[in-house]
Amino acid sequence: MVKEIINIGCIKHRYTDSTEVNICGLNFLMYPGEKVALLGANGCGKTTMLSHIIGLLAPQEGEVRVLGLNPSRDFKKLRSRVGVLLQTAQEQLIGPTVWDDVAFAPLNSRWPREAVEERVSQVLAELNISHLARKIPHYLSGGEQQKVALAGALVMQPELLVLDEPFSRVDQRSKKEITSLLLNINQKYGTAILFTTHDLTPIAPLADTVYVMREGEILARGTPAEVLTDRKVLQAAGLETPDLLELFYALKAKGVDLPPTLSLEEAAAVLLREIKKPDPPA
């Protein structure tokens, strides 16, 4: 049986201002090479959970295991194995140039200069940002900064990539570009990808598995098709049903019961088949 790379049961964390966050419900499990979306409205506990996974927080109760280790205690051991993209990419950029920023981790790990040159050039090319190598990161657009921060997270070729709301501050075009880049990285290197979001748009094309949170409780787990077509779960989590699904629900209320789909192309095909169906004999 394949060993999970993340295993979290019920955990409790108390912040310094005495705010207490309990995360419970379904166990959170993630496996090698899997692409997982952690879905929930703002304030539901997604970022707190990610902070435990990457070792920034330690639970007062319960246990978090990442790649078989305790992330808060074994932070240094996990540093090169887990890549992280923060919600505000700009806060993650520390180098005077894009090249320096992306090269920081391997240089800090004492890689030979030639190996650093090769790996940085490779990851910049993979993310289509080689032309930005000598640019100053803080003068770039939001989408460009996101890609530079992602390059820094990927440069060590981590086994697990953790992204906090990677689609919240970029436009629709950048969302599609980032989705495509993440899919390519997953397919090429087998990198497991965990991302939080309250935006349902990227989930279907990117995720294998979706977890839904509400006020610290993990309500549901399933495929994108299972979760995103479950109106009751989405409403319970304070999330809006995708417009495409609302169309199918509206048609059903009018007596046209068609199988709902998350893909615009599939929806068009379903509707065309319905339109072209011959009328029943009088």
Image (cartoon, helix red, strand yellow):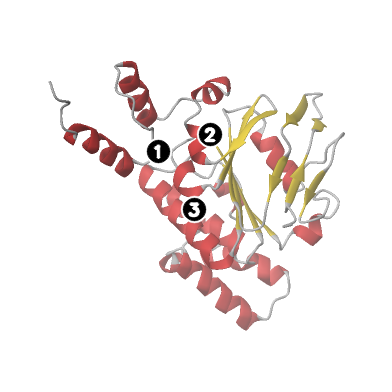
The residue that mark 2 highlights is 227
Residue 174's x, y, as percent? 40, 49
Lateral position of residue 168 relative to residue 30, left or right = left
Please state, as top left, top right, bottom left or bottom right, where the N terminus lies in the image.
bottom right
The residue that mark 1 highlights is 262
Residue 193's x, y, as percent? 59, 52
Label 1 to label 2, Cα distance in Å? 11 Å
Lateral position of residue 249 relative to residue 41, left or right = left
Closer to viewer: mark 2 or mark 3: 2
Say above or below: 145 vs 119: above
Among numbered discs 1 and 2, the one appearing first in the sequence = 2
Is any atom of residue 203 visible in this view? yes
Label 3 is placed on what type of residue?
Gln
| Residue at disc 1, secondary structure | loop
| Residue at disc 3, secondary structure | helix
Q: Residue at x 86, y 51 (%)?
A: 73
Label 2 to label 3, Cα distance in Å? 31 Å
The residue that mark 3 highlights is 145
Among numbered discs 3 and 1, the one appearing first in the sequence = 3
Closer to viewer: mark 3 or mark 1: 1
Residue 61's x, y, as percent? 87, 34
